[in-house]
């Protein structure tokens, strides 16, 4: 028999590698667009839909059903995992991705890239299945150590982006972009090997299947009495490191005070352990389907998230082609882009840990990072040296990573916990729309002015609107704090007056 701790290590390693390959291959779309534009003789707008389909549809299709109170996990992946198990589904997803990249090596038409690079490989169906299986495997097999396991797995996002950004330009330079697809095909097919490592621990084998894949909203929200007092909720598969993205583990604050917010990204997992157990859906108060939109702070955060994700991908996707136009060697360009992934992963983990402290002001901190993003986009137009763009790439990765971590945490502060699942679904849907149309919209700016500086200026102007929305949320928080302080002061004054009156009454009684 294989010892339990070896199974644990194998599950974490396999899940880490799946996230590593998934998000790593997603980050290199900007590199290939630079070569596709030259060979296929198409506009930037047409090419940028390939990457937008990857991220946007993974968000939108995964969350549209939230409005109809259907299954929160991906319907296709959830049903397949329920029927065949996550090992077989991972193997199938890896094979589909590998075959898709193999077909891309022979394609000579843009529509084929849409299908096989944008939909069935990378962030598409193939890796969607594998990614979902990795999330479920960690969620099912870990309990007390789940935040730590997810934190390790989420590091694959930044490391994958960095390593692939260094590897792919070298491959393309040596063998051409078509032959490099063979290498990507082998790399992605190796997910099948990772799938065989996703074994099930003995403790998890006795868990009820309904805990893993509830079929309806009410079933999902029901607490499982056989699993102590915690609600283990394998949530939406969000297939990117820039997202959010998220497995929820709710109700274990007592056990994890320091690691409660150990979050990852550009997809990324979200842990909200500081929340109490969610109440059952059957006991939840009946409200209007659109009652969340009556919350002004929620509306502002939704607008800010949509606008921020609208401009999240273009700066990093365009950076490779932009630096090549400035005559930087491909090796230097790839090194600059790799800084984005390393910094993003580091900042995510750092912010996630700091966020567990009570003194941490999440909304104010989010505002700082959004403003930094705005400033970075403008300042990049005045950069000349490679080291300057390296610093820019690292700061940009940190800003994006911090926003992704803080987005669900801020949401948890401004909506009731009963509405948290629905609120996150709406938030991710808005982010998905931003990912879907953001890069093509900025491509229109480039196609019109033929200058990437105009794109980065446009991104800065758009992000400034998001900064204004977050600033309004911060102002509302300050007002709330001042009001609470005033109420406490007024309460103390009333208590003092009552005490004085009571003392006077006692003195009067004693004198009589």
Image (cartoon, rainbow, N blue to C red):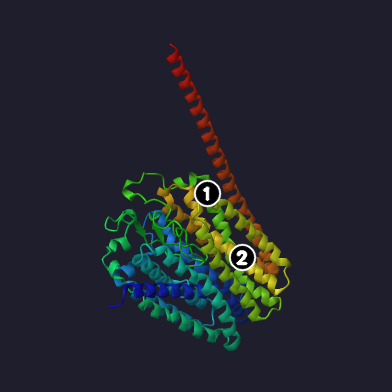
**Quarter residue 203 falls in:** bottom left
> Can residue 320 be seen?
yes
Residue closest to the eye, 244 or 486: 486
Q: Residue at x 32, y 63 (%)?
A: 212
- Give the percent coordinates (x, y) of residue 38: 63, 80
In front: label 1 or label 2: 2
SS at mark 2 in the image: helix
Vertical side of 218 occupied by 36: above or below: below
Q: Which residue is drawn at 41% across and 45% down?
A: 288
Residue closest to the eye, 307 or 209: 209
Q: Mark 2 points at which residue?
A: 396
Q: Residues within 10 Å of mark 2 (few under 14, many from 20)?
A: many
> Horizontal placement of 468 versus 407: left or right?
right
Q: Which residue is drawn at 47% across and 71% down?
A: 123
Residue closest to the eye, 96 or 328: 328
* View extreme (top): residue: 512
- Give the percent coordinates (x, y) of residue 103: 47, 83
Q: Name the residue under label 1.
A: 299
> Horizontal placement of 382 versus 10: left or right?
right
Mark 1–mark 2 Cα distance, whole angstroms, equals 25 Å
> Horizontal placement of 381 versus 428: left or right?
right
């Amino acid at each position: 028999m294989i010892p339990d701790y070896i199974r644990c290590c194998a599950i974490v390693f396999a899940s880490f590698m799946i996230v590593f390959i998934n998000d790593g291959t997603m980050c290199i779309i900007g590199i290939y667009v630079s070569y596709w534009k030259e060979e296929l003789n198409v506009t930037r707008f047409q090419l940028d839909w390939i990457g937008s389909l990857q991220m946007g549809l993974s968000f939108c299709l995964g969350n549209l059903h939230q409005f109809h109170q259907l299954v929160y996990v991906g319907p296709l992946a959830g049903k397949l995992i329920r029927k065949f198990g996550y090992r077989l589904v991972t193997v199938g997803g890896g094979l589909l991705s590998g075959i898709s990249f193999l077909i891309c090596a022979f394609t000579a038409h843009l529509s084929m890239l849409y299908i096989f690079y944008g939909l069935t490989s990378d962030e598409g169906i193939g890796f969607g299945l594998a990614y979902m299986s990795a999330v479920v495997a960690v969620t099912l097999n870990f309990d007390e150590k789940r935040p730590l396991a997810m934190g390790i797995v989420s590091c694959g996002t930044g490391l994958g982006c960095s390593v692939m950004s260094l590897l792919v330009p070298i491959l393309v330079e040596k063998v051409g972009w078509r032959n490099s697809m063979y290498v990507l095909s082998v790399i992605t097919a190796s997910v099948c090997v990772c799938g065989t490592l996703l074994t099930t621990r003995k403790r998890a084998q006795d868990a009820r299947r309904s805990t893993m894949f509830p079929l309806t909203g009410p079933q999902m929200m029901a607490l499982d009495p056989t699993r102590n007092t915690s609600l283990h909720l394998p949530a939406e598969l969000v297939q990117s490191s820039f997202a959010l993205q998220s497995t929820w583990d709710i109700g274990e604050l007592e056990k994890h005070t320091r690691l409660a917010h150990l979050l990852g990204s550009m997809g990324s997992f979200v842990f909200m352990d500081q929340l109490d157990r969610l109440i059952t859906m059957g006991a939840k108060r009946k409200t209007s389907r659109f009652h969340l939109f009556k919350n002004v702070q929620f509306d502002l955060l939704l607008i800010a998230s949509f606008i921020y994700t609208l401009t999240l991908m273009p700066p990093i996707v365009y950076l490779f082609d932009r630096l090549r136009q400035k005559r930087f060697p491909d090796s230097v360009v790839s090194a600059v882009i790799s800084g984005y992934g390393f910094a993003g992963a580091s900042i995510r983990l750092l912010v996630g840990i700091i966020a567990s402290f009570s003194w941490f002001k999440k909304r104010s901190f989010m505002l700082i990072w959004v403003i930094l993003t705005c400033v970075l986009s403008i300042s990049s137009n005045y950069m000349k040296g490679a080291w300057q763009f390296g610093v820019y790439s690292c700061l940009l990765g940190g800003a994006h990573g911090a926003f992704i971590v803080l987005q669900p945490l801020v949401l948890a502060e401004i909506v009731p916990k009963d509405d948290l699942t629905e609120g996150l679904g709406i938030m991710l849907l808005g982010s998905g729309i931003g990912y879907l149309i953001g890069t093509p919209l900025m491509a229109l700016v480039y196609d019109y002015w033929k200058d990437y500086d105009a794109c980065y200026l446009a991104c800065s102007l758009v992000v400034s609107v998001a900064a204004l929305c977050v600033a309004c949320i911060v102002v509302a928080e300050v007002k709330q704090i001042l009001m609470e302080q005033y109420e406490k002061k007024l309460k103390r004054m009333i208590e003092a007056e009552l005490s004085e009156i009571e003392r006077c009454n006692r003195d009067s009684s004693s004198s009589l």
